[in-house]
């Protein structure tokens, strides 16, 4: 996967989780144009980085259990 595409997906996932507006895993995977299994990989990667992510069946959305931010910095040197 291309680096910038990966970063864009991570940032979109973060935005939707922060807003508690992801929909079901199937809905979110369709929004991201990826398979549900690939979505679970993204969620697991965020959790490994310390993201306190849970899923609510009642609201049908992922959400953060406490404040969490994603910051991605890239440095390019020639």
Image (tube, rainbow, N blue to C red):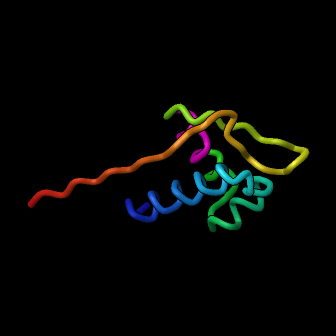
Residue at x 61% of width, y 44% of height: 43
**Residue 44 included in the magenta stretch of the image:** yes
Total marks placed: 0
Among all residues in the image, which is located at the extreme front? 67
Q: Position of residue 46 (x, y in %)?
A: 54, 40
Q: Residue at x 22, y 54 (%)?
A: 75
Residue 65 x/y as whole percent? 69, 34
Is 29 drawn above or below residue 70 in the view shown?
Answer: below
Where does residue 30 sit, x and y in percent of width and height?
A: 71, 66
Q: Residue furthest left?
A: 78
Q: Which residues are magenta?
A: 41-48
Q: Nearer the viewer, residue 36 or 48?
A: 48
Q: Nearer the viewer, residue 40 or 22?
A: 22
In the image, is residue 13 part of the stretch drawn in magenta?
no
The answer to whether residue 45 is above or below residue 7 is: above
Quadrant showing the N terminus = bottom left
Residue drawn 19% across the image and 58% down it? 76
Of residues 60 and 44, the one drawn nearer to the viewer in this rendering = 60
Nearer to me, 74 or 1: 74
Residue 15, image quadrant: bottom right
Q: Residue at x 42, y 47 (%)?
A: 71
Q: In the figure, 3 relative to 58: above or below? A: below
């Amino acid at each position: 996967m291309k680096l910038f595409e990966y970063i864009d997906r991570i940032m979109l996932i973060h935005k939707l989780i922060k807003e508690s507006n992801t929909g079901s895993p199937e809905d979110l995977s369709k929004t991201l144009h990826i398979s549900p299994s690939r979505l679970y990989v993204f969620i697991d990667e965020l959790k490994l980085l310390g993201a306190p992510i849970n899923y609510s069946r009642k609201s049908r959305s992922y959400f953060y259990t406490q404040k969490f931010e994603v910051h991605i910095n890239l440095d390019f040197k020639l």
